[in-house]
Amino acid sequence: MSNYDKKPKPDNRSDNAGKLHNMIHDTLENIDKAEDTMEFSEELDQIEIAAKNKRRKKAVEGFKEELKDEQHNQEK
């Protein structure tokens, strides 16, 4: 079977809101765990952890926006 014979899976967005909610929860947990780890880390590691948490917080903001969109689309 060649790549041309394969059909794409249908776009199933019915559980996107639930997945986004889980991603937000998991990312917030990771932020908390990383902040706890910072107490026992060296300065360079603390800087890297802080930078990663900054990116995580930005990702959470994006997830929340996507969640709003998904919830709005499900209401239609």
Image (cartoon, rainbow, N blue to C red):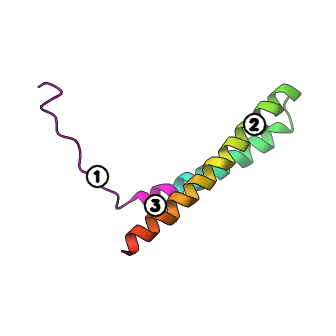
Amino acid found under the numbered disc labelled 3:
Gly
Q: Depth-wise, is mark 3 or mark 1 nearer the camera?
A: 1
Question: Would you place residue 5 above or below residue 8 in this image?
Answer: above
Q: Residue furthest bottom?
A: 75
**Callout 2: few (<14), some (14-19), or many (20+) C-alpha neighbours within 10 Å?**
few
Lateral position of residue 67 relative to residue 46, left or right = left
- Label 2: element kind: helix
* N-term-proximal mark, 2 vs 1: 1
- Residue 1: % across, % down: 11, 25
Q: Earlier in the sequence, mark 3 or mark 2?
A: 3
> Which residue position holds label 2?
51
The residue positioned 55% from the left and 54% from the top of the image is 63
Residue picked out by circle 3: 18
Per the image, the residue denoted by label 1 is: 11
Q: Nearer the viewer, residue 35 or 75?
A: 75
Q: CA distance from mark 2 to mark 1?
A: 34 Å
Looking at the image, residue 66 lies above or below residue 54:
below
- Residue 37 in magenta stretch: no
Whole-angstrom CA distance, mark 3 to mark 2, is: 28 Å
Which quadrant holds the C terminus? bottom left
- Tell me which amino acid carries mark 1: Asp
Residue 8: x, y in percent? 22, 41
